[in-house]
Amino acid sequence: MITCEGLVKIYKSDDLEVVALQGLNLHVREGEMMAIIGNSGSGKSTLLNILGGLDRPSAGSVSVGPWDLLKITDEQLVSYKRDTVGFIWQNNARNLLPYLSALENVEMPMMFSSKLDRAYAKQLLDWVGLKDRMHNKLHQLSGGEQQRVAIAISLSNRPKMLLADEPTGSVDTRTSDLIMDIFRRLNRELGITIVIVTHDLSLANKVDRVVAIRDGLTSTEFIKRNPNLDDNFEPGSSPQETVHEEYVVVDRVGRLQIPKAYLTALQITDKASMEFDGERIIISPPKSLEG
């Protein structure tokens, strides 16, 4: 669904250049639910804006389905944003119109892409647990309920991919769990690809895969084997231990992107010793040269 190879984004202001992404590689399968984590300034929101068609990449390659986002025209970009992408912001003010009811907010995007489908709008609000609140104005809804309206809005154009920027950043833990459960249900029942940007590593228990970004580069992947997401798991039963398997990212020319913390722990700076024992590659500090 998503392929990024050597993705670069440079912001220019007067004589200042800021490199937000400096050769990022990322692959997301269709129907996958994944999280992108990273500290503030790591480039994760820049990546989301590019995938959402809100910003243009500077170099490299990035495609979503059949769309090449590096070569896409302005006219094609409108179609892409209208038909392919659903977007959820952390700030509800960017998602919602305060003078409309929940139902009217969900119906609004439909007017720009196709005919109004009130039955589908009501179904979306039912899916996010707001069947009895759909005629309420925003000031009558809690922050968590407003965020669930935002999820319904993001699905109103029947997108193939859902992008969420810190969707649980402004709600409490209970509401965060509820929102993530809604994402999982939508992912399973609709088969929609979901990419969540967050700084909260605890969300790893709720998604299929976690990719860490540091300094504009994909640095580490965590592939999760979570028994809580198995179809046979019943709510209320004792959760089993979640196991995370960490992967080092290999770029297209075979270079390993090893987390800096590991290199620091081994006191590796510019060179390392590498051995292959037939099964494993062993990386260690350089061996001293004799003679």
Image (cartoon, helix red, strand yellow):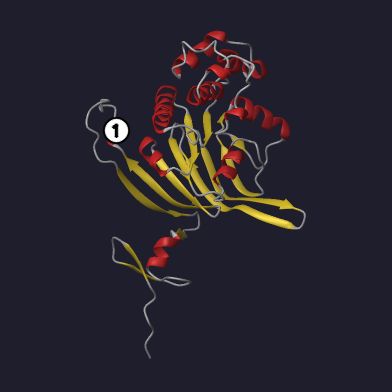
Identify whether 115 is placed above or below 91.
above
Residue 291 on image: x %, y %: 38, 91
Identify whether 264 is placed above or below 173.
below
Residue 138 on image: x %, y %: 57, 19
**Tag 1: amino acid:** Asn
Residue 108 is drawn in which quadrant?
A: top right
Label 1 Cα crowd, 10 Å radius (few <14 / some 14-19 / many 20+): some
Identify whether 221 is placed above or below 158.
below
Residue 275 is drawn in which quadrant?
A: bottom left
Residue reaching furthest to the left: 238
The structure residue drawn at horizontal position 47% and vertical position 27%, both measured from the top left corner, is 192
Residue 261 versus residue 217: which sits nearer the camera?
Answer: 261
Q: Which residue is mark 1?
A: 228
Identify whether 36 is placed above or below 248.
above
Residue 68 on image: x %, y %: 62, 39
Residue 46 is drawn in which quadrant?
A: top right
Residue 160 on image: x %, y %: 52, 27
The structure residue drawn at horizontal position 56% and vertical position 52%, both measured from the top left corner, is 216
The structure residue drawn at horizontal position 58% and vertical position 21%, both measured from the top left corner, is 157
Query: What secondary structure is marked by label 1?
Result: helix
